[in-house]
Amino acid sequence: MVDKSTAKRLVDEMISNLPKHNRQQRPVHTIGVGVDAYFTASDVARKFCIAEHFSGERICAKVRFSNASGGPEQHDGWNDVRGMATRFLLPSGAATDLIATTLREFFARNVEDFFEFTKLDKHKPYRRESPWRKILDMLQLKIPRRDPYPGEETNASAGILNYANRHRFAQLGVAEFKKIGAPVSYARAAYHAIHTFIVEGENEVRRPVRFSWQPVAGVGNTNPDAPPVDDYLRQELEGRLQRWPARFVLMMTIGEAGDAIDDPTRPWPARRVRIVMGTLTLTGVPEDQATAGEQISFNPLRLVRGIEPSADPILHARRDAYEVSREMRGGTACPFSHRSCADGE
Ligand code: HEM
């Protein structure tokens, strides 16, 4: 956990990197859409985690999808990480959140790294690369820098690359970020909660785990050479959900001895046991987006009995940073009544 003044500094540093910031909005993941949903745990889920949402009962949920970049401008077609924040509204009256992004690994191990990143992550005016430079890059086995998207005037890549060149631990996350692209739909991306959590299963067995959402419709990105218009993701989701619900499967990967528990920059080996924990069904995009998405404040440490945080310093720093941000923008912790999830949704 960090003290409140460090949390405020974290948020202030993020804001200082934004060319435009509206204090009523989130400093990052600013553009998003709130969606109604419900979650049903799999038959085996309870064996591995005793938390209430894995009991098997249908659980009402609220989801907010977002573009990770900060600022009020909407550029759905640009290369950007996407977010999926889910609130499970539990029958007992409690609530728990699971916040995930399309990035699998983070680029900072602790708040000091994060502060250094925010110092280097300064935007510079975009310079188009000449065809000769691109050929030279390829001859040197470098990936040529992509051309700016229509309307993209500043470029953050130089600062991010500078940071990644200084720190080996950041290279995986930054490399992933550079080629992440834009999904054809928020419902066609895989989202990862990145941190390790400790879950308690049957017979009080505790295990380190990482969660991710896999889209049932499959992962699909747009063509980077023909980027779509700026604001297609919300309309696409509305149209999709009017035709048919969209689904995500919640996967839980179990860590083994030697796997990084407290470091969100380090991946786990691919061959780890993965448990299907349940299915999230998206049912519709409510008209009232202020309540469904904009006012709500998710928090990665809003947890319930059966799930505990690991000692990951980034995970703990996020608790107060999200609270500071909520206070700044006047968000509410949980604006939903549990009865708002109508039967049969
Ligand atoms: C020290 C590291 C981090 C800091 C300081 C930070 C800070 C923030 C802040 C201030 C917000 C806006 C919160 C609000 O106003 O409600 C936010 C949103 C968000 N962050 Fe982070 N974050 C960090 C790491 C991460 C990581 C590792 C993930 C990956 C799971 C992540 C995913 C998200 C998502 C998806 C949102 C949007 C949530 C929503 O829709 O409300 N962040 N972050």
Image (cartoon, rainbow, N blue to C red):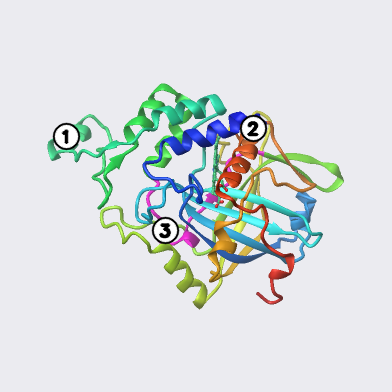
Element on which disc 2 rests = helix
Q: Quarter of the image holding residue 227?
A: bottom left
| Viewer-nearest residue: 108 or 112 | 112
| Looking at the image, residue 121 lies above or below residue 65 | above
Mark 2 highlights which residue? Answer: 4
| In-image side of 148 versus 344 (left or right) | left
Q: Which residues are magenta?
A: 180-196
Q: Residue furthest left?
A: 132
Q: Position of residue 287 (x, y in %)?
A: 53, 71
Q: Residues within 10 Å of mark 2 (few under 14, many from 20)?
A: some
Q: Position of residue 245 (x, y in %)?
A: 56, 72
Left or right of residue 61: residue 329: left
Query: Which residue is identified by label 1?
Result: 133
Residue at image x 33%, y 36%?
123
Q: Viewer-nearest of labels 3 and 2?
A: 2
Crowd around label 1: few <14 · some 14–19 · many ≥20 (10 Å)? few
Query: Separation of disc 3 and disc 2 at Cα?
Result: 40 Å
State the residue at coordinates (53%, 69%): 285
- Secondary structure beneath dot 1 equals helix
* Of callouts 3 and 2, the N-terminal one: 2
Residue 191 magenta-highlighted: yes
Q: Which residue is mark 3?
A: 220
**Label 1–label 2 contact, CB within 8 A:** no
Main SS, magenta region, reads: loop
Front residue of 235 and 312: 235
